[in-house]
Amino acid sequence: MSIELEQYQDRMKKSIDNLSNEYATIRAGRANPHILDKITVDYYGQPTNLQSVANISVSEARTLVIQPWEASLIKEIEKAILTSDLGLTPNNDGKAIRLAFPELTEERRKELVKDVKKKGEDAKVAIRNIRRDANDAAKKQQKANEISEDEQKDAEADIQKLTDEYVSRIDQMVETKSKEIMTV
């Protein structure tokens, strides 16, 4: 009987997926519909994702067009965008809302890169916590005489290998996103 690494690997994959979703919502100067993923609007008393109540498309490199399914939602969508932390001002023409992405300043780019690095560091901490949980499980199994000391050491080595692999992936994601943001 040995420790099951799959459950810990799944948790590490979820941390990577979560980081990937976080990075999708960070704007890098180009229009990206995913930056609106976290925005919800009040739709008949229910908080609803923007994608569920409107068509979102990229009309030009720096412009998103949001066309709500119901014209009455325009004011709600506008309000949701203004109260979000996107820092964008919506333009409403009565039928659709246009979001123009201004060119990012050097200072703003550096702030975004700091944010990217912080999110990457948070993901690494999550991976290390999963490693700790896995190592604790191996120690418990060894104490309960379910596995030998050698099996415990092997399991810990496998867990460390898995941890190194995922930390390396996170470093790669941080570097890629930082380059994307700093590219003018």
Image (cartoon, rainbow, N blue to C red):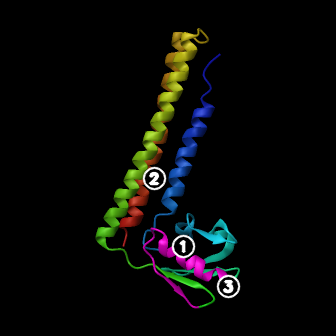
Q: Which span of residues is magenta-colored?
A: 72-93
Under mark 1, the amino acid is Ala
Residue, disc 1: 80
Q: Quadrant of residue 80?
A: bottom right
For the residue labelled by badge 1, is the local secondary structure a helix, a strand or a loop?
helix
Q: Position of residue 15 (x, y in %)?
A: 53, 45
Q: The N terminus appears in which quarter of the rendering?
A: top right
Of the numbered discs 3 and 1, the one sitting upstream in the chain is: 3
Q: Quadrant of residue 14?
A: top right
Q: Is residue 103 visible?
A: yes
Q: Is residue 31 visible?
A: no
Under mark 2, the amino acid is Met
Q: Position of residue 89 (x, y in %)?
A: 46, 80
Of the numbered discs 1 and 2, the one sitting upstream in the chain is: 1
For discs 1 and 2, the disc positioned in front in the rendered view: 1
Tally of numbered tags: 3
Q: Residue drawn 46% across and 45% down?
A: 123
Residue, disc 2: 173
Residue, disc 3: 71
For the residue labelled by badge 2, is the local secondary structure a helix, a strand or a loop?
helix
User: Does the segment drawn in magenta span residue 85?
Assistant: yes
| Label pair 3/2, CB-CB below 8 angstroms | no
- 28 or 35: which is nearer to us? 35
- Other residues around mark 3 within 10 Å, as few (<14) / some (14–19) / many (≥20): few
- 89 or 132: which is nearer to us? 89
Under mark 3, the amino acid is Ala
Of the numbered discs 3 and 2, the one sitting upstream in the chain is: 3
User: Does the segment drawn in magenta span residue 81?
Assistant: yes
Q: Residue drawn 60% across and 22% down?
A: 3
- Vertical comparison of 127 with 137: above or below: below
